[in-house]
Image (tube, grey):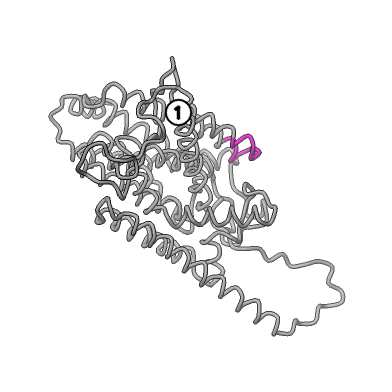
């Protein structure tokens, strides 16, 4: 407690350099989450809150039950560290503090309800409704004004930096019908785009949480890049918050690395997605950065949704074969090797996003799309070759007394 009071006093004194706050907050979040995860593992083991390998007949990698509530440890580590290094910072005032509080209330809602989902289960419509309520909280509507986070403008890669009375397509920021966060009919498109961004990001992270260390590693790298961009733009308080978040996720990774001792569960993936969506808007929209760094997972989810809709299937159902990481797993790559591929792509596109000027960032987005197209084309060809090989290979005669099938299911490493 004495150490905590010392940290609070130093942070609130305005004498601590901002870079030290960012690094210190990240380190403390790392240590807190790392230690808290041990407690969550013991808690889950004591109360039998475990993911069973044969619960849904999709797990071949994990042979033993694994705890699922790792997201609770990440959330607590982030909260405690942000209270020490962000909330006590005198630079954080007014609207920014309100946005932080609203974001934390929404995060608490998602973590609590999806922790219940990890243990007991919730239907897809209920989870969808909870996500929508979380977005409404984040918007902060009150007295005909939005006090929270709302995305009502985008950086225009084709904008002209000099000149007055420019047409909308040459302006550096393209607004979504409104220029101020007032609650009017014109705000409906901005509200819908904000809802789509938050719900889309939370579900994207949830969908890629399919292999040990995959989602946590990709999110940690993305958080680091958001931190760097905030520092470059001199948005130090947001950089502190993003740095704390990155540290918390990194603190969970040693426990989640293959073979995982604990899964983050939906409580973790929903929290991680919500925070990334929020950080990419707070302090100036960094949507292009998030789209580039998370381009492969986002496009993977988009392709899966389109394919399911074309087949008349629900896009909310669980999938252990179609996602990019599962298809890579089917080629013979290990879970760790696939994580390295995703980490490499995430880092490469993050560096590209940092190096490209604003007016040519569209090139980076095109490169992300081209990379995804190449991966899909390559995997589709591999799948066709395997199917042709199986058709050409005669099947062994089945024993006449066999009374059942050998259920050979896709590999799965994360719940």
Q: Which residues, given as a range, are shown in magenta? A: 116-128
Please give left or right for residue 209 compared with residue 226 in the image.
right
Which corner quadrant of the image does residue 97 belong to?
top left
Please give left or right for residue 414 compared with residue 408 in the image.
left
Hey, which residue is sitting farthest left in the picture? 15
Q: Is residue 134 above or below residue 362?
A: above
* Residue 296 in picture, x, y percent from top left: 44, 57
Q: Is residue 397 above or below residue 307?
A: below
Q: Is residue 28 magenta?
A: no
Identify which residue is drawn at 49% across, 45% down: 264
Please give left or right for residue 182 compared with residue 8 in the image.
right
Identify which residue is drawn at 52% across, 70% down: 377
Which corner quadrant of the image does residue 6 belong to?
top left
Identify which residue is drawn at 55% across, 59% down: 323
Q: Is residue 76 above or below residue 67?
A: above
Identify which residue is drawn at 51% across, 51% down: 209
List the residue tagged with mark 1: 187
Camera sees residue 223 = yes
- Count of marks, rendered view: 1
Please give left or right for residue 262 compared with residue 243 in the image.
right
Q: Nearer the viewer, residue 296 or 82?
A: 296
Which corner quadrant of the image does residue 22 belong to?
top left
Q: Is residue 18 above or below residue 403?
A: above
């Amino acid at each position: 407690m004495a150490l905590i009071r010392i940290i609070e006093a130093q942070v609130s004194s305005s004498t601590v350099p901002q870079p030290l706050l960012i690094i210190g907050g990240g380190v403390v979040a790392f240590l807190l989450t790392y230690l808290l995860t041990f407690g969550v593992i013991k808690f889950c083991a004591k109360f039998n809150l475990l993911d069973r390998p044969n619960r849904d007949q999709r797990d071949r990698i994990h042979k033993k039950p694994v705890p699922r509530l790792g997201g609770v440890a990440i959330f607590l580590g982030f909260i405690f560290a942000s209270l020490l290094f962000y909330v006590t910072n005198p630079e954080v005032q007014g609207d920014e503090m309100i946005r932080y509080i609203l974001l934390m209330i929404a995060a608490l809602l998602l973590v609590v309800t999806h922790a219940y989902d990890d243990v007991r289960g919730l239907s897809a419509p209920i989870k969808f409704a909870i996500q929508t309520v979380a977005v409404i909280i984040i918007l902060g509507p009150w007295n005909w004004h939005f006090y929270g986070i709302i995305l009502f403008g985008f950086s225009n890669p084709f904008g002209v930096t000099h000149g007055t009375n420019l047409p909308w397509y040459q302006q550096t920021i393209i607004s979504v019908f409104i220029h101020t966060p007032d609650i009017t009919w014109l705000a409906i498109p901005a509200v819908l785009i904000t809802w789509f961004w938050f719900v889309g990001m939370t579900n994207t992270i949830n969908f890629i949480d399919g292999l040990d260390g995959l989602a946590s590693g990709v999110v940690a790298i993305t958080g680091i890049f958001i931190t760097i961009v905030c520092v470059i733009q001199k948005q130090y308080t947001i950089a502190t918050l993003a740095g704390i978040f990155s540290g918390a996720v990194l603190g969970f990774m040693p426990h989640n690395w293959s073979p995982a001792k604990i899964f983050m569960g939906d409580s973790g993936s929903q929290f991680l997605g919500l925070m990334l969506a929020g950080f990419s808007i707070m302090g100036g929209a960094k949507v292009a950065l998030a789209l580039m760094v998370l381009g492969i997972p986002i496009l993977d989810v988009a392709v899966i949704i389109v394919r399911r809709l074309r087949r008349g299937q629900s896009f909310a159902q669980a999938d252990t074969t179609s996602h990019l990481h599962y298809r890579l797993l089917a080629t013979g790559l290990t879970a760790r090797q696939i994580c390295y591929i995703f980490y490499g792509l995430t880092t490469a596109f993050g560096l590209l996003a940092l190096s490209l000027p604003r007016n040519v960032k569209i090139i980076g987005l095109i490169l992300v799309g081209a990379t995804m197209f190449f991966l899909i084309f390559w995997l589709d060809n591999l799948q066709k070759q395997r199917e042709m090989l199986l058709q050409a290979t005669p099947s062994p005669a089945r024993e006449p007394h066999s009374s059942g099938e050998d259920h050979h299911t896709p590999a799965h490493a994360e719940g």
